[in-house]
Structures are given as C-alpha cells and as structure tokens.
Image (tube, rainbow, N blue to C red):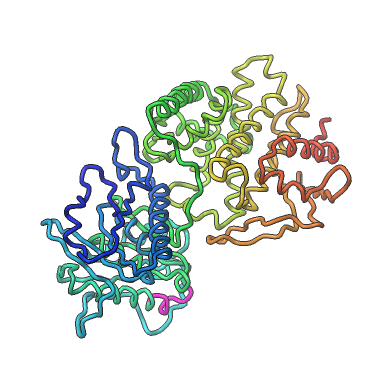
Amino acid sequence: MLCLDVDAPVADDDILPLLPPARRELKFLRLSTFATQGPKGKRPTSSPVDWIALANAVSRLAGEALALRDSSSTPVEFFVVGLAPLPLFVLLGAELSAWAKPQTFLNVRKDTTWDVLRLDDKRPSGVRYFDTVVGLSDVPSEANGLVGVFISTQAMLPRDAVRDFLRAQGNGIAGVVECRNSTSTPVDAAHAPVIAEELAQVLAATRRTYPNHSGLALFVSGPASLAFMAGRAFNPRAMGRAWVASYAPPGYELAFTLPWKPVSRVELRRGPKQEQARQKVLLAVLAGVRTLKNTLKREDLPPFLAPSEGEKLLARLHQLEIADEPEGDETRLSVGQRRLTFGRGLLEGMRQLDEHHRELLALQYLLHELFHFDQDLTSQNYRGVGRGGFALEEVDYWADTLAIGTLARWRMREGGPQLQREPGRVLAEEIDVSLRGIETFDRMESGDRMGELLERRLRRYLIWALQLARARTLRPDTDIWKVLGERLIVELAPLRGSFDNVHDKVVVEALPDTEMFVVWGKRLMRLQRRPAFDPAALVDVVRTFDQRLLRTRMEYVAEEERAVLTPWV
C-alpha cells in the first residue's frame, strides 16, 4: 500500500472485497510505516519532495515483501494499491520485478470505480494497447547518451521538456522513444496483461535500437498502475541504469535512478523537542548569515577571483533570501529563485557541533554552494556529476578553498588588529570546522565506520588535514593565500578497490606497498613506509574517523616536506 497523502488514504474496507476470499493469511505492508512523517501532519508528498527518504522507504517495503515470500511455506500473491507520486510506483515495480509472481494491481479511477488488474494473466490473442510507438528501428543506432522513454495512456510527448531533462543530466541524448495509447482506452482488467507484456517488449526493443546508450530516462503519464508496470518491465542487467523523471511544472525533475541503492543515513528524530532544537540552531545560523551579508567585502574574497566575478558573488549573496524554518529534510539553494532553505538533515548535523563551529559551518556551506553557481554546477546538472570523479573533486576543492579562505579573511578584518596578527590560528580554525562538518555528515550516513569509502572522499580528508597542518605553522606576517593559493593534491596509491553501481571507485583496502603522493607548487613529493609513518594505515584512520591520528600524521608530512610545504618556517 503506497499511501502517503494523509488527507486521502485508501481504506482497508475498500480493498478487502477485491481480494480472494480463500486465503491462509493477509498481510498489509504500508509505505507510511516505512516512511518518515513530517511534523504537524504535513504530507510527505508536499513540495519539495524528499525523494531519497521516500525511495529508501519503498525499497524497505519491497524488501519486507520479498522476505515474507521467501520465508513462506505456501504460495504468496502480491497486491499493490495506493495514492502516491508516480515515480514511487515505478520504483516498487522495479524492486519487486516481474519475477515476484503473481502480482495484481488494485486501481481506483477518478469516478471511484475499482479495477482488479491481474498482470500475470495470459495475454488475450489479437489484443494490442499501445497504438503509437515511435523511435524504434530494426537498424541499431550508433548514438550514445540517454534514451528517453515516454509512456502514456493519452498525453502526447512533451518533446521540449523531455529533451531539457535529458540534457540536464549531462549524458547527451541518444534518442527518444514514445509509447502511447491515443484512444483513451482505460487501463482495465482486459488490457493489463497486454500492457505489461508490451512494455517489456518496448524496453527490450529500445535496448536493441540503442545498443550504445548510457541509460534510459523513464517518463510516465497515466495511472499508478501504468507506472508500476513500467518499473516492472525494467531489467537492470540488460538495460543498465534508468533515470526516473517526475513532472514538476513546467518540466521534469529527477526523482532517483534505477537500480536504487538505498542511502544509508540516520533517520532524523521527530517530535516537538527535536524540532525546537533544530529551530534554535537555525535561528543562530540566520543571525550569522545576516552579519556576513551585511559586512562581507570584495577584499575578503580570494585573489583567484576576477573583480567582476567577485562582484557577482557578492550581489548573489546580498539578494539571497533565507527561509526562517526548515522545509523538508534536504537543504536547497536556488540561485534563480534567490532562496536558501536549510533542511533538517543539515541542521541535525550542526547540532553535533558547538555553537561557534555550527555557525562557521553554515557560512562555509553557503559560500561553497554560491560559488558552485559560478562553476556551472547547479541544481539542474549536478545529478550524476560524481561519475566524473576528478571533475567533481576539482570544483569542490576550489569551492571549499573559496569558502574557507574568504571566511578567514573576513573574520580577521572584522576582528581587528589582534586577529590580523593570528592568520594561522584563524585559518586553522576554519579548516578544522570544515573537517568536523565532513566527518559529522559522514557519520550520519555511515555510523562509526565508512564501509564504502569513496577514493575521492579519502583524498578530501587527506588534503584538508594536510592543509590544516600547514595553516598552523603560519607566521603573523604570512598571508593565508600562501596556504590556499595553489592546488594541493594528496593521495594514496596503490589501493585495492571496486566500483559501486554508479561506477565510483570504492577503496577496499591499502596494500603493503601503498605510499603517499603529494603535489604542491607543481612539485611532487613521495612518502613511503618508514618507522614513523605508514601511509597504508591512513585508510583505516580515515575510515574510522580517527581525526586525532590523521592530524598527527599530516603534521609529520608537513614537517618532513617543510622546504616545499611550509617555506615560511
């Protein structure tokens, strides 16, 4: 039962007469049991939709359903019903797949008529449903990129909106397939098995027509039963990945990708006390942001920004409106709408820090995200950018550098002569806050150990821990851009690794001959295993969040390579 809208749930009394009377046991699995509810009865489907939380809930529900089937000594039949966003039905269909048979969809029409759709019944001979199928060919295409698959019971293909969505994912466009019924034929019991089979055939034909595609993008316009059957027809082994689109006027937004990999994050505690605590954090953050907006000057910005770029950044900061209460769990920055909304997730993470550090972290986050706009990394194209691991790492490095350096300069200028004589302390504190923030949110995702440690995540910890060690050695007359002015690279190699389902490299373990490579000022430094320093051990140091040991080891590196890394000493 995918019923999330608290104003219009599906009643059990409506469903029971539609189920077979002869049954050994009846088990209801409700998505609302697995999904996190908002405060004060707010509908989880309200905008903005927290697709990650809802997708996690659907995945858990499907896992529970399949576990019940596997543990049952008698045959199990699945019935699906509900009122929820279409992408969730696509996901449930993909999670259960066509292998979890038999499946029946219970669909209620707008006139309250119920249809009992037995998806695994034998297809009637000579019956077809989709009379418009465009974009397929017997001759394989050489095009690569995403293939849009638009599936509809009536609506015509919104070609411009579909193409805009495909371009926004950054994969290029291989083609667009339209699969539509143009006669307004309902999705009823007579046509359900036909639709289920035809959708499987269309997706298989799409794979043959576009053998070089980098994934599918699924667009569904019709009843929930159609969305469920579309997900059910998706085979990740044959088709790779699918981007599931959700209609958000005037176009589409990305809900999630298939196959879904649940995001292992700590569920936020709910209740008045928790909401009040997060609101207290937000009020303190808002005060700090207002001060920054009113006092930040061009001279505080990094020297690598051209004057015109600095003025644009300051203008965007001054025009930004910040919501005075969280709206959903995710933090969202819309430069176009000039609006920043702190989500409960970020606020909950900030609660783990003391008041001084949480305000600095919020300001770092704000400047980091604002600079992403100048880097052309926006809410329209950021999905999937992690597949370009080095590209994402590069833009993140400079966004971190801008945020940390700008705030250090700003605090020194505002703090007067005393702070201006302590560049090392101020800069080290900003870098320390950044590392604390990274760790806090990684712990919320992973617990006390990062089981899946991305290689680029490992580098981020190493880089900023070494920058922290360098910052602490600054002299009163040394500018902070001596530390931040060039690109620092720190990595461990070789490492045994694997690739996750989006082809990100995950570190499995270090090897006996793992060493550290550092590049600064175009100079290469290599640190191999020695009595006082074992590069291989740093993998587990980072994985287990041992910040004290990590910082001690990076101080050793800064000291060993002081001629290059800390020449002011």
* Res. 176 in view: no
Residue 419 image offset from top left, x and y in percent: 67, 18
Quadrant where the C terminus sits is top right
Residue at 65% x, 53% y is 455
Residue 219 among those drawn in magenta: no
Residue at 84% x, 51% y is 528
Tell me: residue 375, above or below residue 132: above
* Residue range of the region highlighted in magenta in the rendering: 206-212
Quadrant where the N terminus sits is bottom left
| 346 or 180, nearer to the observer | 346
Residue at 65% x, 33% y is 431
| 116 or 440, nearer to the observer | 116
Tell me: residue 322, above or below residue 291: below
| 492 or 107, nearer to the observer | 107
Residue 59 image offset from top left, x and y in percent: 41, 56
Give left or right: position of 73 versus 434: left
Residue 83 image offset from top left, x and y in percent: 25, 52
Residue 177 image offset from top left, x and y in percent: 33, 71
To which quarter of the image does residue 283 belong?
A: top left
Of all residues, the one furthest to the right in this rendering is 531
Of all residues, the one furthest to the top in this rendering is 417
How many numbered discs, if any? 0
* Res. 274 in view: yes
| 473 or 435, nearer to the observer | 435
